[in-house]
Image (spheres, rainbow, N blue to C red):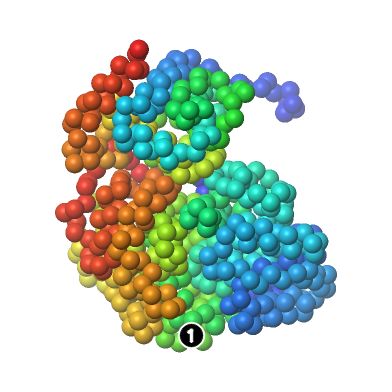
Amino acid sequence: MMHYNKYPEIKPGLKLLKRMYVVTMLFVFGRAFQAVSRVDRGAKEVFAKMPDDFVLDFCVVPNGPHMVVGKDEKGRIKYMGWNPAGKKVTIYMKIKNMDAAFRMLTFQESSCTATSRDRLIVDGDLPTACGVLHIMDLLEVLLLPKFLAKLGVKRYPKWSQLSPVRKWTSRLLTYVRLVA
Amino acid sequence: MILPEYYEFCCRVKTVAGHRALEKISPELVRMNAKKPMIITDKGVAGAGLIKIVSSAISSSKGGKTSVGAVYDNVPPDSDLKIVQEVAKLYRSKDCDSIIAVGGGSVLDTAKGVNILVSLGGDDLMQYAGSGAVKKKLKPMIAVPTTSGTGSEMTLVAVIADHERNVKLPFVSYFLLPDVAVLDSRMTRTLPPALTTSTAIDALTHACEAYTCMAKNPVSDSTALEAIRLIAGNVLNVVKKPGDLEGRLALANGSALAGMAFSNSMVGLVHMLGHATGGACGVPHGVCMSIYLPYGLEYNLHKTSHLTAELLLPLAGPEVYAATPKAERATKAIAVIRKLNQDLHEATQGRHARFLKEVIDRDGKQMVPKDALPTIANTAMGDATQFYNPEDLDFNDCMMVLEHAWEGIPLDLKKVKKGGKGIKF
């Protein structure tokens, strides 16, 4: 019988396509965080409650990718890129593996379900994490068609919660800032 | 029973339970290489003579190699960061090597906070706030609950107030699980009736929410159902006969089981509003739970009626369960909880609060004025338990529930904004 030390180390597959998709989505979400913070009053209220030194590293463990978003010196929300090195991260939100990230970012599984199934882990201030998840839900509503967004949020907002004027204005302006 | 695609369950607390379980504290300390424990407690517990019982159980233990290094008996009901620093200072000055927390939720949570500081160093507990910030094994800790409610002896959570910011800070880490939980009926025998009821309903809430919220799993379901059976079957008897040690032990076990359940499957709306009400108005946690539990179950009814219906069996027993048509079991379960609250209100001569407007402090002053409801709702929006609640909540939803709970009227289910069935749990 072969000694266990002699067994070859099994390295996880790269899952290249899934990785590319997740990288793209985190890039889009990162820029969308910045965009929505400038155009939607609900998002502005949520971000205003976050601490001045707020820097979020939303990542897939163990090897990334990352999405770093935080407040700049003027207190504005800014997408800070994919590399957390050298940044004073105050809150980590980690998805346990690439498959879980893919499920979440393809809206097969909502962020709430991912949290309930221990796939999304928070290291840091929990009220701030609540705010981040509220923004993610809002972005799903603004950026995605209703039939897709309904899969990702517990309750798609009714008119009384999010007026069509606010929804379409914020949607349009977020998209414009996203691609500009 | 719902089997999730994936779940995690962890409870590595050694449980020692019985009518003379305290005598096992000393051997447990020796097993963990601890010789000089510090006892952390509050004035009520010390005044009731419980510390004497604990100390005598430690000293009378055979082969006693342990001696109490220090006793801090001044933990207030709503402990905060400053108290934690004060206790940590005493621990260091007396050169203690372990902690025995004897008390209710505030004492146990304070002890966990103290353990963070004395194990990891420093005086700034804030840096360990939130989830996952405590990353190392802490000093040995034994939890001896004197209320049957918080389940803190079984949980990985500590909630400590920051009175400067008027918020309650959660600390979440597997390293906050105590090493040993000692459940001894002598510890709850002198608990006043109003505290017995509110803490017991707190434990009942842990179990009910663990069973009906999004992170439920088969292991937590099992402990939750047994916890409900033990609590619902004994709480009224214990209030009527405070010396009923069998009943007391049953409640202690129910509380521990409920703690085990909710520590792994988390809680929802009831705790979300409860934490906020405690933070904003200083209402004891157990009182909040008693009031909000039926409302939390009602609010989620359109998504979890099949689960709430299953609570009827442990709540009311097999005869009532079998006699109730399937479609009515969920509402019946909620009615049984309301009836239990009413019975406890009568058994405690009105001291067990049923709704928010009748909560008063020691001076008879109303603790939750109606104009405090927006503050509570606003604070609740920052509480992480909302993510485990089956239905979404925004500020207006919280206000709607709070207004009903303030008046003491059942929730108007037409006012509940119902989400789709896209979310699976």
Residue A141 location in percent, x, y? Answer: 28, 30
- In the rendered structure, the answer to whether residue A143 lies left or right of residue B66 reads left
SS of the residue under disc 1: loop
Question: In this picture, is A166 found above or below B21?
Answer: above
Residue A97 location in percent, x, y? Answer: 51, 29
Question: In this picture, is B291 found above or below B342?
Answer: above
State the image quarter where residue A173 is shown.
Answer: top left
Q: Residue furthest front?
A: A74
Q: Chain of mark 1?
A: B
- Is residue B165 or residue B305 the one in the foreground? B165
- Is residue B270 or residue A101 the one in the foreground? B270
Name which residue lies at 68% across and 80% down. Answer: B53
Question: In this picture, is A180 found above or below B33?
Answer: above
Residue A88 location in percent, x, y? Answer: 59, 30
Q: Which residue is mark 1?
A: B242
Q: Residue furthest left?
A: B414
Residue B130 location in percent, x, y? Answer: 54, 46
